[in-house]
Amino acid sequence: MGRAYAQDLRDRVIAAVEAGQSRNAAAKRFGVSVSCAVKWLQRYHQDGSRTAKKMGGNRPFALAAHRVFVLRRMSEKPDLTITALTEELAARGIKVSRFAVWHFLQHERLSFKKKESARRRAGSPRRGQTSHPVAAVAAQTRR
């Protein structure tokens, strides 16, 4: 991730524009993009701040405020799909993407994997071996 421009550069661009130079000319003179100069001046005129905004940090999950509802709904119906849960949230007026729901559920360690017993019954078709002990005994007795 990049870092903010130096404070003295910001001050010089703002001072040049305040002295009567255009934003485009000041940007070209100091070697910054026009959009940088425009944004710096907009911020300076809005709240008087010449400093860079804070970078980085942790943002809360989009569903953090609705955690109780989502966890209760998942406990009521554990096989609920992410798409269905997204639709239920939209019906409640909570507009989030499927990725936001997936990311929240992953953070809460809720997964949609099959149960261990179901995987054991299925066996391993690629190798021709079964991982279930009863099926292995049955296969040996057939020989």
Image (tube, grey):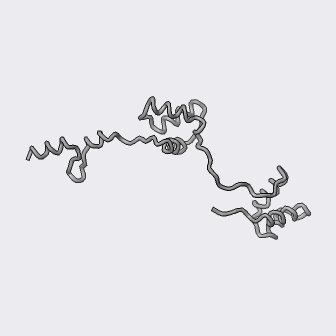
- The spot of residue 112 in percent (x, y) is 41, 41
Q: Residue at x 20, y 51 (%)?
A: 128
The image position of residue 69, as x and y in percent, is: 54, 31
Instruction: Look at 55% across and 43% down and name the residue there.
Output: 100
Nearest to the observer: residue 43 or residue 117: 117
- The residue lying at 20 percent from left, 50 percent from top is 129
Q: Nearer the viewer, residue 96 or 118?
A: 118
Image side of residue 45 versus residue 33, left or right: right
Residue 74 at what x, y percent from top left?
Answer: 47, 33
Would you place residue 119 above or below residue 21 in this image? above
Image quadrant for the N terminus?
Answer: bottom right
Query: Considering depth in this image, is 92 or 70 the residue closer to the camera?
Result: 70
Between 29 and 72, the residue placed more toward the observer is 72
In the visual, does 97 lie left or right of 128? right
Residue pushed farthest right? 19
Q: How many marks?
A: 0
Left or right side of 28 for 71 = left
Residue 118: x %, y % from top left? 30, 39
Residue at 24% across / 49% down in the picture?
A: 125
Q: Give the quadrant of residue 51.
A: bottom right
Which quadrant of the structure image shows residue 133? top left
102 to 5, vertically: above or below: above
